[in-house]
Every structure is written in C-alpha cells, then in structure tokens.
Amino acid sequence: MSRGITWKSGVVAVVLVVVAVVGTMLLIKSQREPLGVEVTVTSSAIVGSGPSCELQLDLQIANSGDRGVLVLSAHIDNLENSSRGLMASIDPGEADVRTYALPLDPCPPSPQALGLGDVVVVFRLRGGSTEHSVTATMG
C-alpha cells in the first residue's frame, strides 16, 4: 500500500525548491550588477565653419569591470541625426579617450548653442546581445 508522501521525499522537495529560489535570485542579481563603465566628456568643440562642420566630443571611457571587453557606441539626446557613431572596444581594467565626431548642418556658433541633451554611451559585452547605457558626466 502507498502511504503518500514520505518524509524523505518531502525533504527532497524542500531542497529542490530552495535551490530553485536561490538560483533565480543569483541570476537576477548578476543581470542587475553594474558592469563598471564610467564615461566623462572631457571636451567639446565645433570644428570647421560654414556648411561643413562637426561637433567633436572627447570621451574618457573607463572599463573598471572584470566581466569582459566592452563594445561601445554613443548618441546625443535632443540632437537630430545623432547616430551611434563612436565604436570602441575597451578591455577590462583599461581606460581610453575616444573622440566622437558628428557632422552638423547648419553649423552652430558653439556647442552650447545646440542645446545638447545628455551624451548617452550604449555598451554591451563583446559577443553579447544585451545593451546597457550610461549617461556621460561633464568633466
């Protein structure tokens, strides 16, 4: 005759539930963990004059994480035709200055005249498909 659930099968069921809950919590934590990317705008300038000029931003990018090579691109909020033009790979523990250049038409007198929004750097781990973003601080 079957006696229903024995204490051994009950213990096994409880252990499986605990393992599932802990595993799910660790997975969620790893996805929310910051990747250690810091971006600072070190300078901005309008280069050229007349109809052919461009906005140049020097970005200090630091990969203080240890989870892999970052592949980066950037765009500027509130600026039309701001494509993701900056492509860079930064190794773990490395920092680099990259220049982001964006053609402008018409040419404004200064970067401030553009009424720029935030410079947003979008990044992902090399080989990964999940994108993350960080807003650059003004240096």
Image: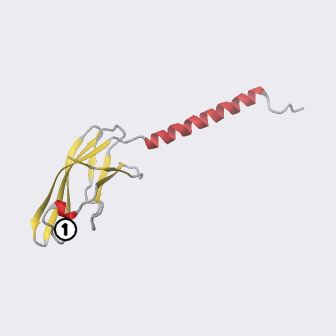
Residue 133 x %, y %:
35, 51
- Quick check: 18 above or below 91? above
Q: Quadrant of residue 16?
A: top right
Q: Relative to 121, is 109 on the left or the right?
A: left
Front-most of residues 91 and 52: 52
**Label 1, on which residue?**
104
Nearest the eye: 40 or 74: 40
Quarter in which the N terminus is drawn: top right
Asked if 70 appears above or below 64 in the picture, the reply is: below
Residue 21 pos. (x, y %): 59, 37
What sort of colour scheme is used for the picture? secondary structure
Amino acid type indicated by mark 1: Leu
Q: Residue at x 23, y 62 (%)?
A: 115
Residue at the spot 71% in from the left edge and 28% down from the top edge: 11
The one nearer the camera, 86 or 119, is 119
Residue 94 screen position, x and y as percent? 25, 39
Q: Residue 132, position in %: x, y?
A: 38, 50
| For residue 106, above or below residue 90 | below
Secondary structure found at label 1: strand
Q: Residue most toward the left?
A: 49
